[in-house]
Image: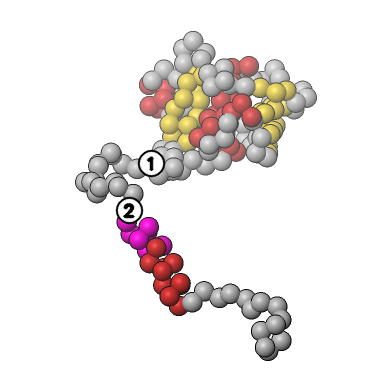
Amino acid sequence: MADGSGPSQARHPTIRGRAALLLTAAALLFGGCGVSPSEVQYAGEAPTGLAEGTTVFFLDDDGTPTPSQRDTGRLGTVLGAVQLLMYGTSPPEVGDGLHTEIPDTTVSPSIVDAGEHVTIRLPFMSGDISPEGIDQIVCTAMGVIAASGRDLDRVEVVVSLTDTGPEERSCPVLG
């Protein structure tokens, strides 16, 4: 087989072949695509993706859930937003004509946010909280969900009271 009568030897690129391949690749890389350089175009501040605060929903004079921004410096969680809502209205919110129909309580709600399924267990009996009060809580939860980038059409929010079973709810102003 040393006499060349055996299987053909494997072909390896020569140095000259490698150099030609490298030069071709460099020409393509550095040759550009015909786009000439231009000046930097200023288009305002870039979005950071960070929320300036948490949006909670109170009721206007007609009983419609109305968003109010709380300056927390971050988006927060569904549980944190609902707890913030349950502290009640601030003096500026009252001055804007907003009110709440969520009763005072020292018991926190139980909230499980499992991505596409959010369960909210409220520490109230059905006679203690109005449907509008529940709307405030659901809208606040859905506001956080939307601000986090999730599609509201794909998230199910279920609310239960101490004397009722779970009920799927949506926010009348968010969809």
User: Which residue is labeled 2 in the image?
Assistant: 32
Place of residue 156 in the rendered image (x, y in percent of width and height, measured from the top left): 67, 28
Q: Which amino acid does label 2 sit on?
A: Gly
As drawn, the label of residue 158 is none
| Mark found first going from the N terminus, 2 or 1 | 2
Mark 2 residue element: loop
Q: In which quarter of the image is the N terminus?
A: bottom right
Where, quadrant-wise, is the C terminus in this rendering?
Answer: top right
Mark in the foreground, 2 or 1: 2
Q: Which residue appears farthest toward the left when viewing the image?
A: 39
Magenta span includes 112: no
Instruction: Find residue 104 and report its image quarter.
Output: top right
Q: Is mark 1 on a helix, strand or loop?
A: loop
Q: Residue at x 39, y 63 (%)?
A: 24
Residue 26 within the magenta-colored segment of the rendering: yes
Q: Residue furthest bottom?
A: 2
Total numbered labels placed on residues in the image: 2
Specify the segment rendered in magenta: 25-32
Q: How crowded is mark 1: few (under 14 residues within 10 Å), some or many (20 or more)?
A: few
Query: Residue 30: where, in percent of width, then height?
Result: 33, 59
- Identify whether 145 is placed above or below 134: below
> Do we see residue 65 in this rendering?
yes
- Name the residue that disc number 1 marks: 47
At 49% from the left and 77% from the top, the residue drawn is 14
Residue drawn 41% across the image and 72% down it: 19
Is residue 102 visible to us here?
Answer: no
- Residue 127: percent from the left, percent from the top? 70, 17
Q: Residues within 10 Å of mark 2 (few under 14, many from 20)?
A: few
